[in-house]
Structure formats: structure tokens, C-alpha cells
Image (spheres, coloured by chain):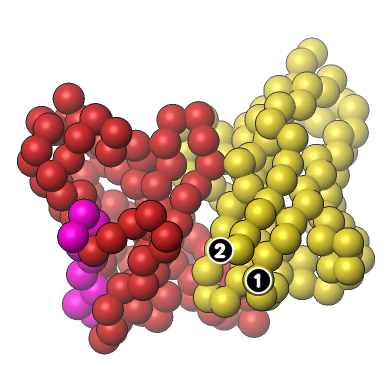
Amino acid sequence: SAVISQKPSRDICQRGTSLTIQCQVDSQVTMMFWYRQQPGQSLTLIATANQGSEATYESGFVIDKFPISRPNLTFSTLTVSNMSPEDSSIYLCSVEPGTSGSWEQFFGPGTRLTVL
Amino acid sequence: GQNIDQPTEMTATEGAIVQINCTYQTSGFNGLFWYQQHAGEAPTFLSYNVLDGLEEKGRFSSFLSRSKGYSYLLLKELQMKDSASYLCAVSGANNLFFGTGTRLTVIP
């Protein structure tokens, strides 16, 4: 298993500003993921962040809007840039330890973002 | 592309059995997961199926048919604390794609 923390847990931001969300894992993992969960909806994958390479973005998400850093095997950041009210959502990071031959992912507690 | 379907909402009675279905069409398949998510919390892992058949874990069981692109989650002896959203997710090529989730309400 893996224990994941995220900072901040929640924030209220003004339109046009940017917020960087941090994700810290208690063990070294290769695969880290960033998801968005809009109110009342399921999780949508934003990007996959592997250490030592550029993040891979899913359709509908671009690096200019959601730049990601992955400086080492235990840490990643997601920035939500030039925010608008439509970006109000919960942002979750997850990791895939890859142990026991399983692709199970463990999720952080999420960051609840409100954009005014 | 990815397409995962599950019912939006279900209601069941405490002590009963409920089956939540999930159908999927994906490019690449490394397994199917069920996650539980209580309101305001992160998803937590329930089960993982990569081969056809039934996996049982206490009150929870999950079934997979790869040829039919079909899975179900079976919850027995329902408790009030089982009221939550249940997310079906398919693992593709290093990615996990989620269905819209089924909101289960357990009533007395």
C-alpha cells in the first residue's frame, strides 16, 4: 500500500490566478496520476506523471493549463493555471505501486478547489 | 476509446443483497477495479479482477466476463455504512479509466 498526502486540502481562488497542488507519497513509486472530480461526477484522468519524463496528458487537457512536475519518485505537483469557475473541482493524485502484479491505485485525500 | 457504463443510482434495504453492474469497451485491458467512495472522501480499493470469474472478499464479491465486457459488484448483508458511490474502473495501458459511478443508498 501507499500513504499519500496532498497540499492544500482546499482553497478558494480568484479567477485568473494559478494554484499549485502538491502530492507526497511515503514510498518510491514510478507511476503517479492526477485526476479531476467535478461535483457529483466520477473521476477523470488529467495526466500520468512518470519521474524523468514529460507528463502524458489525456484528451481535453493540455500542459499550458495543467503543468505537472515530477522531480523525484515520491513527489509531484499539478498547477491549475489561469483559473476560471469551471475549474472548481476536487483534484486527486494517485499512485500505482505495482506490487503483487496488481495495477491497484491508491488515492490521496484530494484538494477541493473553488474558483470565484 | 474508452466507454464504461454503470447505473447512476440504486437503493437497497439494510441486510439485503445488491448487485451493481458495469459494462465496458476499452482499448487494452489489464484488469477491472471496483472502488468505494464516500461523500467528500477519496476512493478506496474494493476489488480487482483480471481473469474471468468471481472474486470473493468478505461481504463483497466481484465478477468479470472479459468476452462480454461485463462485471458486477455484489454486496451482501448490506449495512447503512455501505451507502456510498461505487466506481467501476478499467485498467488500460498504464491508465485507469473510471465509470460515472453508482450512488448506492441503503435504507433501514
Instruction: Spot the residue most to the top.
Output: B108
One can see residue A93 in this view:
no
Residue at 20%, 70% (x, y): give it: A69
**Residue B96: assigned label:** 2
- Mark 2 nearby-residue class (10 Å; few <14, some 14–19, many ≥20): many
Q: Which of A63 and A37 is in front in this view?
A: A63
Residue B85 quadrant: top right
* A81 w.r.t. A103: above or below: above
Disc 2 is attached to a residue of which chain? B
- The amino acid pointed to by label 1 is Ser
In the image, the segment drawn in magenta is: A64-72
Q: Is mark 1 on a helix, strand or loop?
A: loop
Residue A67 magenta: yes
Q: Which of marks 2 and 1 is in front?
A: 1
Instruction: Spot the residue most to the bottom.
Output: A52
Residue at 76%, 26% (x, y): give it: B10
Q: Where is residue A13 in the image (x, y as percent from the top left)?
A: 13, 33
* Chain letter tied to red: A
Q: Where is residue A75 in the image (x, y as percent from the top left)?
A: 26, 69
**Residue B27: assigned label:** 1
Colour used to depict chain B in the structure image:
yellow
Mark 2 and mark 1 lie on one chain; the one further toward the N terminus is: 1
Give left or right: position of A12 versus A50. left
